[in-house]
């Protein structure tokens, strides 16, 4: 899954930079990969705790199954060039094994995650729209 996170999320994050012509693909990939590494080392602990402990109880076999299933689904999407969310994939894998093993899932945690999946793109859309309008108003576009 970590390999897929690198192939998928680095491409998603660097795509606009490369598409706009700011950087060549290799340079953008390296800079974004380093940025993702810094993010993983600094602010990822709360997310790790939520996915690894709060959704459902995981054992070694169920954790492997969730990771492997998620990795295969993201790999398949990457093969076809589809920009998918690795985070959504792993949450789906964890929920799947939690339901199958009978441990159940914490519905409140799932609702919080679903809210984030809706609120995050809407927030990004709003901020991007306002920022571009301000830049256009300033005559920079």
Image (cartoon, rainbow, N blue to C red):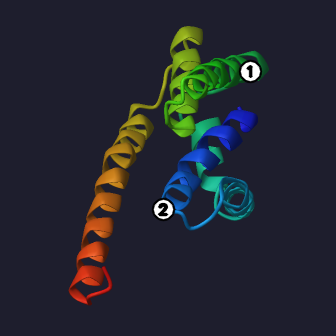
Q: Determine the residue positioned at 62% across, 64% down.
A: 23
Is 68 in front, or is 140? 140
Q: Position of residue 24 (x, y in %)?
A: 65, 59
Give me the C-alpha separation between circle 2 and circle 1. 39 Å
Can the viewer see residue 53 in this picture?
no
The answer to whether residue 117 of the structure is visible from this angle is: yes
Say which residue appears at 65% left-offset and 46% top-offset.
48
Judging by the rendered image, the residue that carries numbered circle 2 is 20
- Judge left or right: residue 135 versus residue 75: left
Q: Is residue 50 left or right of residue 135?
A: right
Q: Is residue 100 above or below residue 37?
A: above
For the image, the number of numbered tags is: 2
Q: Is residue 127 above or below residue 66?
A: below
Q: Is residue 105 left or right of residue 108?
A: right
Under circle 2, the secondary element is loop
Residue 117, quarter of picture: top left
- Disc assigned to residue 64: 1
The quadrant in which residue 25 appears is: bottom right
């Amino acid at each position: 899954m970590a390999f897929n996170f690198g192939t998928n999320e680095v491409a998603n994050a660097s795509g606009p930079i490369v598409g706009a012509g700011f950087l060549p693909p290799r340079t953008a990939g390296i800079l974004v990969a380093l940025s993702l590494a810094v993010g993983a080392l600094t602010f990822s602990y709360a997310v790790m705790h939520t996915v690894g402990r709060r959704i459902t109880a995981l054992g070694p076999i169920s954790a492997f199954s969730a990771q492997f299933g998620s990795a295969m689904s993201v790999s398949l999407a990457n093969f076809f060039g589809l920009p998918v969310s690795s985070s959504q994939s792993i949450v789906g894998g964890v929920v799947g094994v939690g339901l199958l093993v009978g441990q159940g899932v914490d519905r409140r945690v799932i609702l919080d995650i679903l809210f984030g999946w809706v609120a995050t793109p809407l927030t990004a859309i709003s901020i991007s729209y306002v920022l571009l309008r301000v830049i256009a108003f300033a005559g920079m576009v």
